[in-house]
């Protein structure tokens, strides 16, 4: 028996063992796309029909086992009806069941990654041998769905309900130790021995030294829980997971419910329950939007990688200005293996930058993600200095000094003379024009913006800003460096606030207008958090820093006076004038009290109402909850449309990803423009009409009106 396909190859080994090898031609990874599933169906049928087969070995011809289903095909499947989608899932289930029901044992040799459908297929094998360093898991809840190819059924029977709930609801990847401990795999060996060990285990089963039939029956039988145990396992988990996931992410609870309903049934009766629940989740807006974010992330990274090929590979970098931001950039660079010089003019600042890097590394040691030796090696890649001695060796310099134009210009002009021609200078500015900052430079083509978001180690976005004279090579090199740091770079053109801050400040302007009309800022925060933001606008201002926001608001007002005027009294100014700068000094719209770990926790502050009273209308405006949400979101969406039309960003996808990764725009809504598409541009323009008396902040663009009239959308789906 042999089978030669584009995704799967089968061959007979000595002793009646069939080896089924996944090796998707032309791709660096194995994944379950339609073609692979079709070939798997043929290969499994050929194995089943050959009476000489006495055992099955499942391997991979690549550095990973199977990374899961092809997500690019998901949206096509999700357009089907629930019944059609469930029927397709059951077809795949039947294929996996055939492997599980073979009249001989099977062993999967797992290397690299086995995720999602890849792990679900491995679970259909009788046994699993895992290579050390491999990661496995079922991450589907991160896409708004859950395992739909038998994962809820098989994983719960192999690992127990509690472990299966944790793995499926959490959607995390797990290493060999955790996988072996819960029973998801049967052995862990060095990568070079994974196939050999799997063959050894398979032969043991074939020779009767393992009761492989009992193992298969365990996976097909009902879950071994009495009614009380089942109630405690599932009901308690549902309450906990629902509280943690929130109402906008229903799939983790739906997965638990599917497990609970199938727990008392045999495999063939439990699988249709899983399929029906999966199909219901796949039809939700949350799943559609989270899959769109996943695909958008991939598209943005493809753009970035293509750009990066045109630049210089950064082997060594530098950051000007230590402190918290400089230390964060140094940590990120060193932790990703890129040497970095950290320069400041004061020893205490260097010490602060190094302590910031050491603190972040120490936290990784506490979580078991890093060893002390790794920490020492990482810190060794950071060279603190008060001089420019090593700057002749670096390929890129990030300027991260104080956010003052004259200071930045002086520092950039100084460092330009210390580096070789072709070295990229990048300013980590959040508001100052890159074109203006380049005015004093001899080589403005080598200069661009590189805007990190705070905290650097957590925020995935980096804006790479092209000034009027920035060269393509400088952009490409900076994009490549951002990718090397594990960030998602989005290239934008120069304007006040660039992309993210330009869109954010109309949102803050809307907040100031509402508070000025007497609307309680606590109510505004509560409603926007219910909308899905991780924090409301007042809380966000406190986190950003009231002084920082006040400075940026002035820059935005100067750049866009028609819709971001900052001349009158406002809630933001009232906080600034009262010396309430937010989390950084423990008081803003809220007051902040450190918890036992030193993390600032917000609490209402009764003093704030009195401070805001002078900037508020005597009679509060009567607005519904829906009005308040519209008043906040419309300026953000309209400014997003302006940025797209002005060519500040290349595509709707890049804009949406930037807002999700840079602002925390609710991922389950897909981004500002995808959310606008879902609501409908006609409906949005009609809502905006009701607020036109408030000024151009609420005036849809001409292009928005055209799309609304034609029934069009920002995203043109294929």
Image (spheres, grey):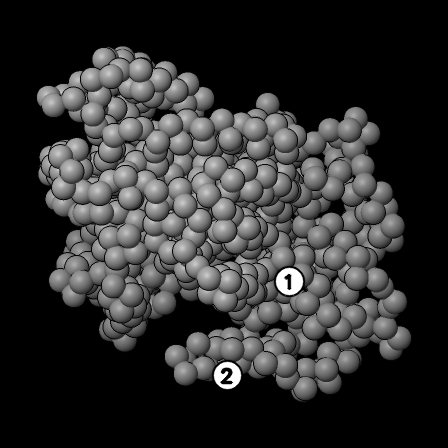
Instruction: Count neighbours of disc 1 (C-alpha within 10 A) and say few if under 14, some if 14 to 19, many if 20 or more.
Output: some
From the image, state whether disc 2 or disc 1 is nearer to you: 1
Left or right: where does residue 353 sit relative to residue 470? Answer: left
Q: Residue at x 51, y 31 (%)?
A: 89
Q: Is 248 drawn above or below residue 190 in the view shown?
A: below
Q: Position of residue 59 (x, y in %)?
A: 23, 30
Splitting the image into 4 quarters, where does residue 683 fall?
Answer: top right
Splitting the image into 4 quarters, where does residue 475 fall?
Answer: top left
Q: How many marks?
A: 2
**Quadrant of the rendering where the C terminus is positioned:** top right
Q: Is 163 drawn above or below residue 436 in the view shown?
A: below
Front-most of residues 71 and 21 = 21
Q: Position of residue 678 (x, y in %)?
A: 70, 39
Instruction: Count neighbours of disc 2 (C-alpha within 10 A) and say few if under 14, some if 14 to 19, many if 20 or more.
Output: some
Front-most of residues 577 and 174 = 174
Disc 1 target residue: 529
Splitting the image into 4 quarters, where does residue 2 fall?
Answer: top left
Residue 496 seen by the camera: no
Q: Position of residue 200 (x, y in %)?
A: 11, 37
Q: Residue at x 19, y 47 (%)?
A: 187
Q: How far apart are the alpha carbons under marks 2 and 1?
A: 21 Å
Element under disc 1: helix
For residue 392, which numbered disc appears in the image? none
For residue 593, which numbered disc appears in the image? 2
Q: Position of residue 609 (x, y in %)?
A: 72, 82
**Quadrant of the rendering where the N terminus is positioned:** top left
Element under disc 2: strand
């Amino acid at each position: 028996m042999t089978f030669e396909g584009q995704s799967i190859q089968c061959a007979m080994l000595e002793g009646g063992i069939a080896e089924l090898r996944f090796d998707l031609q032309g791709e660096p990874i194995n994944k379950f796309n339609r073609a692979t599933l079709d070939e798997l169906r043929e290969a499994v049928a050929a194995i089943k029909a050959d009476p000489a087969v006495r055992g099955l070995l499942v391997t991979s011809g690549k550095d990973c086992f199977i990374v899961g289903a092809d997500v690019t095909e998901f949206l096509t499947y999700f357009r089907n009806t629930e019944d059609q989608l469930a029927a397709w899932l059951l077809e795949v289930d039947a294929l996996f069941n055939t492997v599980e029901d073979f009249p001989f044992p099977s062993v999967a040799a797992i290397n690299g990654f086995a995720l999602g459908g890849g792990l679900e297929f491995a679970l259909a094998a009788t046994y699993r041998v895992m290579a050390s360093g491999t990661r496995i898991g079922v991450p589907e809840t991160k896409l708004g769905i859950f395992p739909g190819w038998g994962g809820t059924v098989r994983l719960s029977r192999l690992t127990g309900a509690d472990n299966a709930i944790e793995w499926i609801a959490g959607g995390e990847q797990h290493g060999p130790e955790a996988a072996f401990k819960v029973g998801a795999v049967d052995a862990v060996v060095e990568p070079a021995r994974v196939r050999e060990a799997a063959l050894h285990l398979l032969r043991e089963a074939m020779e009767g030294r393992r009761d492989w039939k009992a193992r298969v029956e365990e996976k097909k039988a009902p879950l071994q829980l009495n009614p009380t145990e089942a109630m405690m396992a599932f009901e308690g988990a549902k309450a906990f997971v629902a509280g943690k996931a929130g109402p906008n992410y229903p799939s983790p609870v739906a997965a638990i419910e599917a497990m609970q309903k199938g727990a008392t049934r045999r495999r063939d009766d439990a699988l249709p329950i899983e399929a029906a629940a999966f199909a219901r989740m796949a039809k939700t807006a949350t799943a559609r939007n989270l899959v769109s974010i996943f695909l958008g992330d991939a598209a943005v990274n493809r753009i970035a990688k293509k750009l990066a090929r045109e630049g210089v590979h950064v082997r060594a970098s530098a950051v000007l200005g230590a402190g918290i931001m400089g230390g964060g950039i140094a940590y990120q660079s060193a932790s990703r293996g890129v040497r970095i010089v950290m320069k400041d003019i004061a020893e205490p600042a260097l010490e602060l930058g190094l302590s910031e890097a050491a603190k972040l590394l120490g936290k990784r040691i506490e979580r078991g993600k890093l060893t002390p030796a790794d920490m020492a090696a990482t810190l060794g890649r950071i060279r603190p200095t008060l001089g420019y001695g090593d700057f002749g060796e670096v390929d890129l310099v990030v300027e991260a000094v104080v956010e003052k134009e004259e200071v930045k210009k002086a520092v950039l002009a100084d460092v330009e003379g210390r580096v070789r021609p072709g070295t990229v200078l990048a300013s980590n500015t959040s508001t100052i024009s890159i074109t203006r900052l380049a005015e004093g430079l001899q080589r403005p083509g080598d200069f661009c913006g590189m805007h990190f978001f705070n905290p650097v180690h957590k925020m995935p976005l980096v804006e790479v800003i092209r000034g009027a004279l920035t060269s393509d090579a400088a952009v490409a090199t900076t994009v490549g460096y951002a990718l090397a740091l594990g960030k998602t770079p989005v290239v934008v053109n120069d304007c006040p606030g660039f992309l993210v801050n330009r869109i954010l400040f109309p949102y803050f302007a809307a907040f100031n207008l509402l508070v000025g009309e007497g609307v309680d800022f606590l109510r505004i925060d509560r409603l926007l958090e219910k909308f899905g933001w991780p924090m409301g606008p007042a809380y966000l201002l406190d986190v950003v820093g009231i002084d920082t926001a006040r400075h940026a608001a002035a820059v935005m007002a100067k750049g866009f006076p028609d819709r971001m005027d900052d001349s009158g009294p406002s809630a933001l100014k009232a906080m600034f004038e009262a010396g309430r700068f937010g989390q950084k000094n423990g008081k803003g719209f809220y007051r902040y009290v450190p918890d036992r770990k030193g993390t600032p926790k917000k609490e209402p502050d009764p003093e704030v109402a009195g401070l805001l009273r002078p900037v508020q209308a005597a009679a509060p405006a009567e607005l519904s909850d829906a009005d308040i949400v519209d008043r906040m979101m419309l300026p953000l969406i309209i400014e997003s449309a302006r940025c797209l039309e002005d060519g500040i960003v290349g595509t709707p996808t890049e804009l949406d990803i930037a807002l999700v990764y840079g602002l925390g725009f609710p991922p389950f809504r897909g981004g500002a423009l995808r959310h606008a598409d879902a609501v409908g541009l006609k409906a949005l323009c009609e809502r905006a009409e009701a607020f036109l008396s408030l000024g151009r902040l609420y005036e849809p663009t001409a292009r928005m009106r055209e799309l609304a009239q034609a029934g069009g959308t920002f995203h043109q789906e294929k």
